[in-house]
Amino acid sequence: MLDRGPVQLDNDKCRRGEREPHLSGSRLDLSGLCGGGAVRNNTSRSSRSNNNNNNNTMVDSHGNALPPLSPSSNNNSSSGSEIEQKPVPLSPSEALKYHGTGLTDYEKQEIEKYPEVYYLGLDACKINAKPGSALNSGYDDDNGSYNKVIHDHVCYRYEILEVIGKGSFGQVIRALDHKTNQHVAIKIIRNKKRFHHQALVEVRILDELRKKDADGSYNVIHMLDYFYFRNHLCISFELMR
């Protein structure tokens, strides 16, 4: 039974700030979908961004494992035109040095897990999370849904723009990927065990569809990525116009 408690906002963070770069969450291992695994180190995360076929596994704080994306020549093909020059990410130490005053105490610790930082959400009214407190340190509501804050970040890479869908499994947001400068849809699964297990099945099916439609010849929406963020399984998709 989860304790009920108010979500606290840090008013000092409710100010406009510079947009910053950020990182995607770590990929997971489909082969380890039903098993546990160790969290990969920063070196593994860095190499992962250049190799979608790695066998490393990422787990959340409850030991739930996720898989790595299968290769697809169609990745991001429907999300928008390619940008001419991709942004250079900050390292965690650089982000803390130049913009640490705009982050919460929770984020100052959390950011160390992300070797590439593309976006910090400095203009957002951030949640003043308390590690170890009720409701997932204050990031969840009573139903286990993630408390989304407009213009805050997801994985120090995606900027939350709006909620575009809701369901029993979670909510879907429209977000700007500051790594690719493309808009995407991100499904954020509720932080409940039964929904998490169903979402893992969905990830496996979506990955199979992705492999079967590598050239994009079928009318199938493509999963772009999947990752854990603050104990929530997140799945990013092409944003349909």
Image (cartoon, rainbow, N blue to C red):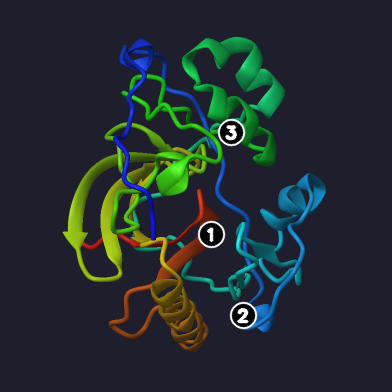
Crowd rating for badge 1 (residues with CA inside 10 Å; few <14, some 14–19, many 20+): many
In the rendered structure, the answer to whether residue 100 lies left or right of residue 203 reads right
Q: Please identify the quadrant where the C terminus is shown.
A: bottom left
Residue at 79% in and 50% down: 41
- SS state under label 3: loop
Which one is nearer the viewer's eye here, 186 or 112? 112
The quadrant the N terminus occupies is bottom left
Tell me which residue sits at (46%, 84%) in the image.
201
How far apart marks 1 and 3 lie (CA) works out to 15 Å
**Looking at numbered disc 2 in the image, what kind of residue is underneath it?**
Leu
Counting from the top left corner in percent of width and height, residue 130 is at 49, 32
204 up-or-down from 36: above or below: below
Crowding around mark 3 (Cα neighbors within 10 Å: few <14, some 14 to 19, many 20+) is many
In this rendering, position of residue 220 left or right of residue 202: left
Is there any visible trace of residue 215 in the rendered image? no
Whether residue 204 appears in this view of the structure is yes
Along the polypeptide, which appears first: circle 2 or circle 3?
2
Q: Which residue is mark 3?
A: 117
Residue type beneath disc 1? Phe
Q: Tell me: residue 164, above or below residue 168.
A: above
Q: Residues within 10 Å of mark 2 (few under 14, many from 20)?
A: many
Amino acid at pointer 3: Val
The residue under label 2 is 33
